[in-house]
Each structure stands twice: as C-alpha cells, then as structure tokens.
Amino acid sequence: MAKVICVTNQKGGVGKTTTAVNLSYYLAKNKQRILLVDFDPQGNATSGLGFEKDVLKATMTDVMLEKATLEQVILKSKFKNFDLAPATPQLANAEVEMTKMSKKFVQLRDEIKKVSNNYDYIIIDSPPSLSLLTVNGMIASDYLLLPVQTEFYALEGVAQLLESMKLVRKVNPKLKLLGVVATMYDKRTSLSIQVLAEIKKYFKDKTFNTTIPRNVRIAEAPSHGVPVGDYDRFSKGAKAYKELAKEFMERTK
C-alpha cells in the first residue's frame, strides 16, 4: 500500500505546491510510483504539470461530490511513474456542498484506499487554509509534510496547524509529522539564517537537512508546465529537490 503524505501549510506562498510537484517528480525519477492529488482549488499543481484546466472532463470536484471515483479522474503525466488527480477552482464550490454529506470528512480517505495498491507514494497538495478539504487530506494521510518559508512570518499559524493535527488524530491516530522543509532560503541574508535557526529550534530533528533555495528556475518552471528538474536539472532548485527526495525516502522507509 502507498504511503500517503499531505503537503500542507495554512499560510499561502510558502512553496507548498512547488514542493509537492517537484518532490513527486524526483520520487518518480527514483522509480517510485507516484500519484499527486491536486487538492487545492487554485489547481496550480495541475497547470504546473502542463494540463489545461478548462478541458478536463473529471476532476477532484467530482470525486469529493461522489460523481466519479478517484481512479476515474487520474491522468498520466508526461513523466514516467507520475500520475495526477487534477483540480480546478470548482473544488472551492464543492467544499460548500460537502458540508451536507455524511462522509464529508473521510471521502478522500475512502477513495485513496481504493487506488493505494497502485502506488508507492500518494502526495496530497492541500489548500493554504484549515478548511474541510485540508481536514480530508489529513485524515487520509500517514504523514504531514510542512513547507515553511525562511521569512519573517514563517512560524505564524504553524502552531494552529499542529493543534489541528492533534484533533485529526482522534479520527486518524496514525498521522505523524514527517518533517518541516525550509523553503525560499537565501544564505546571503541574515534573516534567512535566523529564521532557519528558529525553525530548527522549534522542530528539532523534524527539520529536513535539505533547504530549498530562492531560485528563479523554480519560479519559471510552472509557466512551462514542467517541474524544475525537467526545466533545468542543473539549477540550484532542481538539485535541492533531488536531495530532498532522497532524504524523504530515507524518512519514510
């Protein structure tokens, strides 16, 4: 059965989707069978892999409203071992309708169970909020992966997210914090260095050794519909995500 990881942070702009996409890409390059579930209504993981959202026939909206199974919406990406369950902005509307459903908290978990044997890892890119979708993602997962940017408000909201994790454990007792990834790191600035030190002080050995640098190639890659490793595999950003994938696999053995 696949190990299920929810990539989450209630704060936007921390490199959450970027981490979900690029980690998935390098895990696939390491011959792991990957399903990336785009569970963010912005659908950035979907467009970042080159899919046009307006022509998709079925998406995670249909899965959550029980109009399609997860297996029915999965698409093959252009990369070997790497599948995607796509999302569009309609997913935000689905969240409102889900409040009336009896399975509103466990719909994603139940669907993931049906495809789990087809993959080694299932990565969920959750929305940047503590929403019903985020709770679904946590309940469906074995681990949380928390990207935290090395900027001034980095740890703001993290404590609340960890409190939510404790509540989710009442429904999903196996949920663990896999680790924290420092993103947008710039070793030339004292602020980045200070914030990374704070992250390590707060999370201790849960902090990944690999840091993701602030890198223009990482920012450019989604506009070309590919992960940074395909766009420029020699860039600092690509090398960092390649290292992160190795460390990630060690932690999830």
Image (spheres, rainbow, N blue to C red):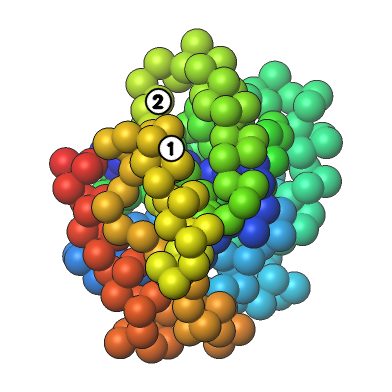
Crowding at mark 1 (Cα within 10 Å: few <14, some 14-19, many 20+): many
Quadrant in the picture for the C terminus: top left
Q: Earlier in the sequence, mark 1 or mark 2?
A: 1
| Residue at screen point 50% across, 11% down | 170
The picture places residue 109, in percent across and down from the top left corner, at 49, 32
Q: Secondary structure at mark 1?
A: strand
Q: Is residue 245 left or right of residue 133?
A: left
**Residue flagged by tag 2: what amino acid is it?**
Leu
Q: Quadrant of residue 157?
A: top right
| Residue at screen point 75% across, 32% down | 98
The picture places residue 184, in percent across and down from the top left corner, at 50, 65
The picture places residue 88, in percent across and down from the top left corner, at 71, 61
| Residue at screen point 53% across, 26% down | 162
Circle 1 is placed at which residue position? 144
Q: Quadrant of residue 73?
A: bottom right
Circle 2 is placed at which residue position? 175
Q: Is residue 145 visible?
A: no
**Residue flagged by tag 1: what amino acid is it?**
Leu
Q: Is residue 148 visible?
A: yes
The picture places residue 22, in percent across and down from the top left corner, at 41, 67
User: 170 or 108, which lies in front?
Assistant: 170
| Residue at screen point 62% across, 73% down | 47
User: 237 or 127, which lies in front?
Assistant: 237
Q: Is residue 224 left or right of residue 52?
A: left
Q: Secondary structure at mark 2?
A: loop
211 is higher (above) or lower (below) than 206: below
